[in-house]
Amino acid sequence: MTQIKIFDTTLRDGEQSPGVNLNQLEKLELAKQLEKFGVDIMEAGFPASSKGDFEAVKKIAETVENVTVTGLARAVKSDIDACRDALANAKKKRLHVFIATSPIHMKYKLKKTPEQVIETAVEMVKYGKQFFDDIEWSAEDASRSDLPFLAEIIEKVIDAGATVINLPDTVGYTMPREYGAMFKYMKDNVPNIDKVDLSCHCHNDLGMALANSFAAVENGATQVEGTINGIGERAGNASLEELGVALTIRNDYYPYHTNLVLKEIKRTSDMVSKFTGMTVPGNKAVVGRNAFAHESGIHQDGVLKNAETYEIITPELVGVQSNNLVLGKHSGRHAFTDKIKQLGYQLSEDKIKKAFIAFKSLTDQKKEVTDDDLFAILTDIQTDTSNVKRYTLEGFQVQYDTSDKPSATITLITPEGNKINQTDTGQGSVDALYHTLDNMIAEQTHLTDFQLNSIGQGRDALAEVHVSLIVDEIEVSGRGSAQDVLEAAVLAYINGLNRAIYQKRVNATVK
Ligand code: KIV
Ligand code: ZN
């Protein structure tokens, strides 16, 4: 069995999804979860892109132990220097440097001739080699590049010291057979190709990302890049959980294995969805809510007689618990703390205390507290940046009448510790609340997206709201969960505001 190395880029390409904005603590928690999931390499960010990203990559590099951590760099010295500094304390590190190789990118974006692109690529790999033994070189837009030119530049960057060659389908344009043929061409035409790992990186614009990844593997790729839940630029990247499960379920067909720990899939997927605000569609393969639901009578009958009639993946394989009913009104602190450990959270005493209070207040409204509810409470508290001055909601009231404009009254504690109170109206209840908040805060805020979901099922399910905001020109997302949808909406808005304040502080403190 050949090992396929898994390169996760949820924290870099995934974070490039429109509207996604993770804070440092969320990135760190995700990195720890990706380590549990068993990825071989994680791309923690693009250190030269922002101070926040630099700091996040640095923190992840200092924390993660068993995974190679990499950072992305354009083919310029300052980007490589930023990766060198951010990854300085990593146990295992890699530089990921890229330059575009397609005619359209070289001519219009880089404004370089093919010869100049070769020269830059070689020079930058040599430069990076002073600091990194392991260098991945990516030919951006490889799938629309001229094959003999690609072979020539690959041979030269390998001579310069590249250890991994990545051939992305940057715009999700290729068809599987075509993409596979590109890998075969390189295998056949680059004399030193066997010195390196060949890697694929597929975008999903035509829905081919996973099929293309398999085509690459069939033709010699030993590394697959992708993201959790398939998030990423535009239509996203190949979905790693789908890849891992497909290789396991079809191990009769494919002689490949990965180090992925499949029972961590559900947790990893939930975390990505919660942090990014990108809800997983119900029909999404492997992690969708309906992935294991059998609706038609014929199917249900078949599954009852023998599950394998219609079920090729068991929920347990991917960590979906069939019965996740856990704690209730009478559960004490001890049972709660045990459950936290069982769910894999490591929280400080202070955060456990906060979580217990939140749990108890939930049991006043909800008889059965499920793992999904706990996940919402614990993850929010785990990634809470409460050491930074912030807005705190003290209380609110909404007046709604079908014949009149709704009005909202909010009491808020400002970051300076002042209690303020205001009333305003809006087109609907949420608009009235947001309008009122806008009039109370110092920041200029613009709402660009609002999503409401339920956590779990039933009338007493928690509501979760995700918002995207621009706060004083900083793009942030915010989320809030509560049993009441309006409370979840207010909490999400305030969470977004607080994240902008936190982001401003990170930007100001990092050199
Ligand atoms: O899609 C792409 O080409 C990329 C590269 C930077 C690897 O993300
Ligand atoms: Zn990409």
Image (cartoon, rainbow, N blue to C red):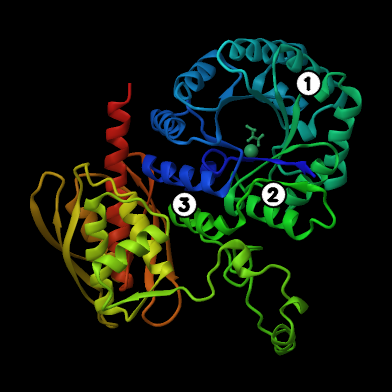
Marker disc for residue 127: none
Q: Which mark is residue 154?
A: 1
**Which residue is found at the position 76% from the left and 25% from the top?**
196
SS category of the residue bearing label 1: helix
Query: Which comes before the other along the chain, label 2 or label 3?
Result: 2
| Label 3 lies in ligand 2 vicinity (Cβ under 8 Å) | no
Lower sequence index among marks 1 and 3: 1
Q: Amino acid at mark 1?
A: Ile
Residue 141 on image: x %, y %: 72, 32
Report the residue at 76% width, 43% height from top. 173
Question: Is 368 in front, or is 484?
Answer: 368
- In this figure, which residue is indicated by the disc labeled 3? 276
Q: Considering only vertical position in the picture, is 200 above or below 298?
A: above
Categorize mark 1 by other alpha carbons within 10 Å: few (<14), some (14-19), many (20+). many
Q: Is residue 499 above or below residue 190?
A: below
According to the picture, the residue beneath numbered tag 2 turns out to be 204
